[in-house]
């Protein structure tokens, strides 16, 4: 049994059926790529796992424990973290506030729980240092940072509370070449620590270089489940576009 | 860029950052308050005196409590246009319970705050459950609350509150007016709540990015409902202070007060679109409004012009705020 088991997920938005019976699993320490065309349902599936969306049918377990009935906060507490494509940062708050958002440590003064700012700042700084990241100042508002720096904050937030599964939605889409390498190295580090990573990406080169397994979503179902070491660009592209027009698309990706 | 200019800018930015970090107050609004006080003391010989200072605080206490409510709601990315009407309704409910029904003062006091909280709870519930925008819901409540106040009082002022209630408005322990004491204590508690508790931090996070707050596992809708209820309860407190001060429940009390309260919150550094705000900043904003009104009174400027001044200040404050945000934030 895998660490994360997702089975039979169905989801419609109004009349539009996005997912119809998706199965997905990931072992501890495994890096799974989740690829598919725009609208294939990748982000929707992941948001169902984190609890932002509610599925119409299906089951999800983490370490054998069902979590369909849990709120997003409770699922985070169980160890499921997601780095959203839009990063989901509060831009007018500083780094520590963002990293600890929803999980602020408190200390009691006269029986009233006050947020422990000093502890938040110290731990946030520690996390940023551990990531080897370069932020201008930890007490600045996140909105004043560059895209890569904001990404660092989002990553730090996902890693601060010892996650079991980290889902990354297009983490490299908005990054410069050097920053992309940083993210890929980070995913390899997470693997060494036994942390499961689900990587959603359109950059198939990134996916092929860092994953153990690649799941292809097409038309709301898991159309293919490929072991990365035994597959190649052509096969992945073929699974994404579904055969037709495959040689052109594969040739294009191979060049890119 | 010359090096002196860079240094000057550095000092100014450091002062700005320090002011926000240590005092939770924007340096600009403090400077405006001091400049306004200086200007008024030059223009009027009556301005600089302890008794006039008390007058300003007394006049600011009602608006100040409403401005605290506005800070919480606007800080969370919402809006409460019903503040003034709910304040009027609460005063009338308190007077009705204390005078018409003849119940003891503590019950009347409680009724004021409960009436406000209930109106706020209705606002919050409709906004979060029925997905009607806050602007519309609270605009509707502005009319509904005023209407209920007029119905309950039959359109007349209810005079002669219980004496214990009047003490809340007119008592002067140690020479300090009771409304000022209640206002300052409320502001202190609400400042701690907004700046130092999880509830307060989450309030600003919701206003900053609802998306971020939701994905962080914050119960956004529940907290919104609480915030509108808090806003209503504070409007109830303001209604109590006002009714107790004039010793009457006046169904027209608080007319257009939301304009001044929201202006005070915005001048104090609350971001109109949420995500930023502090009660101490709002207090400075409320004092700016108080000094402005007091000064215009001392200079015998007609109250019609004062309305114009407040409206103009609101637009100016939002303009400056947006200018700052555009400068500071990358989009």
Image (tube, rainbow, N blue to C red):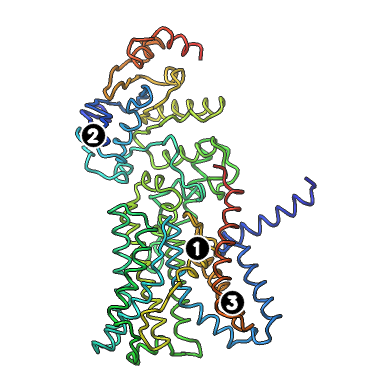
* Left or right for A14, reference B81: left
* Left or right for A64, reference A84: left
- Judged from the image, the secondary structure of the residue bearing numbered disc 1 is loop
Residue under circle 1?
A: B278
Of badges 2 and 3, the one in the foreground is: 3
Residue A122, percent across and down?
A: 50, 49
Classify mark 3: residues with Cα within 10 Å, few (<14), some (14-19) or many (20+): many
Q: Identify the image quadrant of residue B39.
A: bottom right
Residue lying at 57% horizontally and 62% vertically, measured from the top left: B22
Q: Chain of mark 3?
A: B
**Mark 1 or 3, nearer chain start:** 1
Residue B97, percent across and down?
A: 26, 84
Residue lying at 65% horizontally and 67% vertically, measured from the top left: B31
Disc 2/disc 3 C-alpha distance (Å): 61 Å
Q: In the image, is residue A162 above or below residue A237?
A: below
Classify mark 2: residues with Cα within 10 Å, few (<14), some (14-19) or many (20+): some
* Left or right for B229, reference A83: left
- Judged from the image, the secondary structure of the residue bearing numbered disc 2 is strand
- Callouts 2 and 1 close, C-beta under 8 Å: no
Residue under circle 2?
A: A61
Task: Give a yes or no on whether discs 2 and 3 share a subunit.
Answer: no
Q: In the image, is residue A123 above or below residue A133?
A: below
Q: Identify the image quadrant of residue A49.
A: top left
Residue under circle 3?
A: B291
Q: Chain of mark 2?
A: A
- Callouts 2 and 3 close, C-beta under 8 Å: no
């Amino acid at each position: 049994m895998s660490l994360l088991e997702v089975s039979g997920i169905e989801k419609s938005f109004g009349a539009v059926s996005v997912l119809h019976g998706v199965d997905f699993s990931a072992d501890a320490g495994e890096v799974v790529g989740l690829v598919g065309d725009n609208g294939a349902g990748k982000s929707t599936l992941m948001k169902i796992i984190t609890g932002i969306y509610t599925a119409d049918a299906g089951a999800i377990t983490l370490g054998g424990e069902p979590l369909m009935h849990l709120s997003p906060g409770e699922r985070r507490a169980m160890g499921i973290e997601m780095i959203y494509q839009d990063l989901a940062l509060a831009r007018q708050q500083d780094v520590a506030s963002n990293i600890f958002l929803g999980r602020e440590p408190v200390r009691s003064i006269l029986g009233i729980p006050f947020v422990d700012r000093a502890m938040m700042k110290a731990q946030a700084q520690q996390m940023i240092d551990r990531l080897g990241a370069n932020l201008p100042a930890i007490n600045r508002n996140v909105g004043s940072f560059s895209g890569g720096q904001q990404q660092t904050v989002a990553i730090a937030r996902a890693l601060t509370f010892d996650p079991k599964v980290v889902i990354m939605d297009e983490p490299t889409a908005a990054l410069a070449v050097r920053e992309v390498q940083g993210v890929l190295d980070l995913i390899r580090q997470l693997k060494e620590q036994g942390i499961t990573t689900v990587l959603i990406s359109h950059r198939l080169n990134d996916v092929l270089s860092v994953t153990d397994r690649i799941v292809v979503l097409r038309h709301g179902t898991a159309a293919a489940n490929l072991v990365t070491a035994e597959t190649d660009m052509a096969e992945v592209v073929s699974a994404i576009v579904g055969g037709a027009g495959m040689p052109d698309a594969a040739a294009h990706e191979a060049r890119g | 860029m010359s090096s002196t200019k860079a240094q000057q800018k550095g000092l100014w930015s450091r002062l700005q950052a320090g002011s926000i970090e240590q005092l939770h107050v924007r340096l600009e609004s403090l400077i405006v308050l001091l400049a306004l006080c200086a200007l008024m003391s030059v223009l009027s010989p009556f301005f600089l005196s302890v008794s006039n200072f008390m007058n300003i605080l007394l006049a600011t206490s009602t608006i100040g409590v409403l401005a605290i409510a506005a800070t919480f709601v606007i800080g969370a990315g919402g809006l409460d246009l019903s503040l003034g009407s709910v304040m009027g309704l609460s005063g009338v409910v308190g007077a009705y319970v204390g005078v018409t029904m003849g119940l003891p003062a503590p019950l009347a006091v409680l009724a004021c705050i409960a009436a406000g909280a209930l109106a706020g709870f209705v606002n919050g519930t409709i906004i979060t459950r029925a997905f009607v925008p806050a602007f519309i819901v609270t605009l509707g409540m502005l009319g509904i609350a005023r209407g209920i106040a007029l119905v309950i009082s039959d359109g007349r002022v209810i005079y002669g509150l219980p004496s214990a209630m009047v003490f809340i408005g007119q008592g002067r322990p140690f020479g300090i007016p009771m409304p000022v004491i209640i206002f300052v204590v409320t502001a202190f508690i609400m400042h701690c709540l907004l700046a130092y508790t999880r509830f307060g931090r989450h309030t600003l996070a919701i206003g900053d990015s609802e998306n971020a707050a939701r994905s962080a596992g914050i119960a956004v809708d529940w907290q919104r409902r609480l915030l509108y209820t808090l806003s209503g309860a504070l409007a109830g407190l303001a209604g109590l202070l006002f009714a107790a001060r004039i010793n009457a429940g006046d169904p027209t009390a608080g007319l257009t007060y939301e304009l001044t309260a929201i202006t005070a919150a915005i001048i104090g550094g609350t971001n109109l679109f949420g995500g930023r705000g502090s009660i101490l900043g709002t207090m400075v904003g409320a004092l700016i409004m108080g000094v402005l009104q007091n000064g215009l009174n001392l200079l015998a400027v007609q109250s019609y012009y004062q309305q114009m001044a407040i409206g103009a200040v609101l637009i100016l404050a939002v303009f400056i705020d947006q200018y700052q945000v555009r400068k500071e934030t990358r989009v």
